[in-house]
Image (spheres, helix red, strand yellow):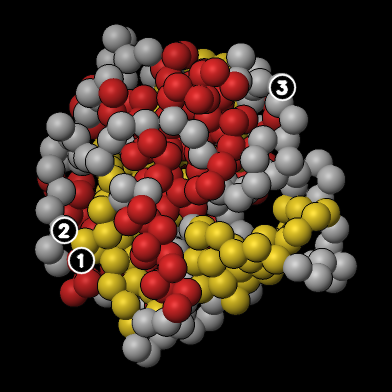
């Protein structure tokens, strides 16, 4: 049976109590965060085995994060602790419409300095899925480690999935961010990207052709409450107009979408060679992924807000 491996940041989300800016907020609640980690949790909730690859500080925050993933059923065999670097932190304020404002504290942090040695025992197989984002690509050390894993996953025949998850305030140079994302997109078979992110990367809101030119086969384009679109490199396109819910916090909604989307492909046994097979029901996969994203937006936090198949289908109709 295929399994999911994700690599990237693992951090504490200090989430504001109530609505307002970071300046106005006086209280925060501690939650586990990190987009690829959220993807892993959603996949586990939908019945798949998922492994997370990262490094945290050897501190109380790191202990909390590792325990959270373990409690959620994510395999933590490839999560290590550093005595040299700290655990990443993020402070998040929530607006009335559920949108968020982030402030990150992650310069000399462990998830920016993991190395090939940390993951030498990872064993990818044909049919497995390997997922990553751009937040942990901000250092040369982490980029080289990602390349090492990507090349191994590709050689093994795993399906490679990429969510750029652009966080502009983590990069001094937007052009560098764009260049790095497009460089790593060339490794991917499946890319999930926000409509505004796609426009930033390609100059057009419908610029998925630029990703197809890199070798990407499947592009899922999300547009918040308006739903999402899936475009395939053979010209097919699928749309979902989204689901109307009372959104209180968008944190993790996109990660929930991607975790469910990947899970849908895994459910159908889609391999790198069969991603464009006519029998893969992208319409149904997209529809349920949108349901999962909507469900997560109705509750606070990312991991605490995610649902399994039963409660998602019951709550979002």
Q: Secondary structure at mark 2?
A: loop
User: Residue 82 appears in which quarter of the rendering?
Assistant: bottom left
State the mark number for residue 139. none
Observer able to see residue 99: yes
Q: Earlier in the sequence, mark 1 or mark 3?
A: 1
Position of 38 compared to 101: left or right? left
Q: Earlier in the sequence, mark 3 or mark 2?
A: 2
Q: Residues within 10 Å of mark 2 (few under 14, many from 20)?
A: some
Observer able to see residue 174: no
State the mark number for residue 244. 3
Q: In this picture, is 30 found above or below 222?
A: below
Front label number (3 vs 2) = 3
Q: Residues within 10 Å of mark 3 (few under 14, many from 20)?
A: some
CA distance for labels 1 and 3? 41 Å
State the mark number for residue 122. 2
Position of 233 compared to 76: left or right? right
Q: Secondary structure at mark 3?
A: loop
| Residue behind mark 1 | 119
Q: In this picture, is 240 found above or below 28?
A: above
Q: Locate the N terminus and report the quarter of the image it occupies.
A: top left
CA distance for labels 3 and 2? 41 Å
Q: Please give the name of the residue rendered at 54% of the width and 76% of the height, measured from the top-left corner.
A: 106
Query: Residue 156 at x, y = what percent?
Result: 13, 45
Position of 142 compared to 194: left or right? left
């Amino acid at each position: 049976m295929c399994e999911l491996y994700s690599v990237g940041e693992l951090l504490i989300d200090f989430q504001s109590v109530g609505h307002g800016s970071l300046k106005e907020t006086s209280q925060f609640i501690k939650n586990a965060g990190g987009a690829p980690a959220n993807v892993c949790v959603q996949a586990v909730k939908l019945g798949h085995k998922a492994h997370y690859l990262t490094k945290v500080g050897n501190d109380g925050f790191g202990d909390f994060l590792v325990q959270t993933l373990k409690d959620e059923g994510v395999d933590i065999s490839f999560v290590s602790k550093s005595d040299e670097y700290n655990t990443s932190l993020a402070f998040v304020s929530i607006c009335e419409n559920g949108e968020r404002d982030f402030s990150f504290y992650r310069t000399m942090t462990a998830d920016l300095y993991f190395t090939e040695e940390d993951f030498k025992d990872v064993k990818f197989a044909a049919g497995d899925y390997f997922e990553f984002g751009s937040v942990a690509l901000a250092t040369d050390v982490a980029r080289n480690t990602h390349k090492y894993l990507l090349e191994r996953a590709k050689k093994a025949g795993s399906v490679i999935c990429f969510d750029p998850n652009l966080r502009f305030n983590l990069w001094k140079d937007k052009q560098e961010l764009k260049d790095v994302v497009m460089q790593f997109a060339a490794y991917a078979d499946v890319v999930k990207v926000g409509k505004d992110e796609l426009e930033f990367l390609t100059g057009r809101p419908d610029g998925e052709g630029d990703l197809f030119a890199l070798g990407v086969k499947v592009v899922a384009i999300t547009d918040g409450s308006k739903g999402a679109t899936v475009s395939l490199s053979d010209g097919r396109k699928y749309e979902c107009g989204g689901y109307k819910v009372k959104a209180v916090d968008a944190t993790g909604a996109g990660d929930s979408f991607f975790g469910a989307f990947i899970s849908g492909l895994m459910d159908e046994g889609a391999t790198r060679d069969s991603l464009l097979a006519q029998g893969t029901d992208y319409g149904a996969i997209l529809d349920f992924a949108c349901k999962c994203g909507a469900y997560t937006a109705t509750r606070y936090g990312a991991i605490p807000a995610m649902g399994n198949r039963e409660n998602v289908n019951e709550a979002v109709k």
